[in-house]
Image: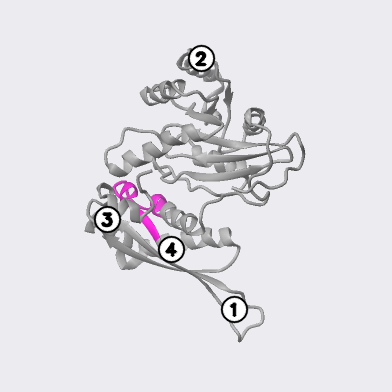
Amino acid sequence: MTCLESPSQNHRSGFVALIGRPNVGKSTLVNQLVGEKVAITSPVAQTTRNRLRAILTTPIAQLVIVDTPGIHKPHHLLGERLVKSARSAIGEVDLVLLLLDASEEPGGGDSFIVNLLQKQKIPVIVALNKWDLVLEKQRNSIFSEYKNLLSETIWPVFSCSAANGDGCEQLIKRVIDYMPLGPQLYPPEMVSDQPEKILLAELIREQVLLHTREEIPHSVAVKIDRLEEMPRSSRRKDSQGCIAVLATILVERKSQKGILIGRGGSMMKTIGKGARAQMQNLINGPVYLELFVKVAPDWRMKPSRLAEFGYADS
């Protein structure tokens, strides 16, 4: 990667991996830190599937934040690859930011990740997220429980809220302290290096997660089949070009396809409307979106299907 000219000799830059269990708020924190939506979020666990790299540029530093899939016990080949992707990120960064859910008591999954990180020769900062959900009278006891979890470490611990930004400024200042001296790696206006097709596909999958039943979310993948810029209308001087997006939503069973389409196509219209609005915010212009639904039995267990949808073994 070609480095850009550094604003000063004391400028810092580096890579930070966000590690934690599913649904602890990693993607929400990424969006909060960079100030724009670059990662999809939902109440559904295991939302993140790709190792998204978000870019936070300040006057004194540039952080490349790697949002990883939640570390969990996998139940299929896709799950195995997601966990492998998250674990491999640990060895490729300058710092690990371990995100824990302070609104819940520490569990076995947290202990597993702490033990995993203790075996690595890399600095770790701990952030107790969702601190705004912890009652004032319970905060001391919750903090003590997590300090016990981390008793064999010397990692600094911060409390924060990815939802409202509380504590995030202090957290970022501490993260910057760990970064090596170096120039900017990306132009300052960039907030993500993800290909546009990946970002658009994720916006569609987010709407599926938000609007469908419990059985649907983890069985869904989205692929952008066509992305084309349409010219402005010659009849109207005030018209602007439109981005045409054709995408396929993959599910594992016919019943899931029926749920996605909905009665009279109602669910597909809802998903399409929500995704189109998010896409227009992303590209700052009009979008024409056409969605198709395809059934591929047990696609999460098939290497060829995983590769087709960007989940190849790394």
Residue 135 in the image, given as x and y percentages of width and height? 53, 24
Considering the numbered disc 4 on the image, is that residue within a helix, a strand or a loop?
Answer: helix
Q: Are marks 4 and 2 in contact (CB under 8 Å)?
A: no
In the rendered structure, the answer to whether residue 210 lies left or right of residue 12 reads left
Q: Which residue is mark 1?
A: 232
What number is the disc on residue 1?
none
Q: Image height check: is 60 above or below 192?
A: above
Foreground of the two, 310 or 18: 310
Residue occupied by mark 3: 256
Comes first in the chain, label 2 or label 1: 2
Q: Amino acid at mark 2?
A: Ser
**Residue carrying label 4:** 272
Q: Are marks 4 and 3 in contact (CB under 8 Å)?
A: no
**Amino acid type shown at disc 1:** Arg
- In the rendered image, the residue lying farthest to the front is 2
- Label located before the other in sequence (4 or 2): 2
> Label 1 near label 2: C-beta < 8 Å?
no
Task: Single out the mark in the foreground, 1 or 4.
Answer: 1
Span shown in magenta = 208-223
> To which residue does mark 2 refer?
144
Judge whether 39 appears above or below 262 on screen: above
User: How many C-alpha atoms fall within 10 Å of the one at disc 2: few (<14), some, or many (≥20)?
Assistant: few
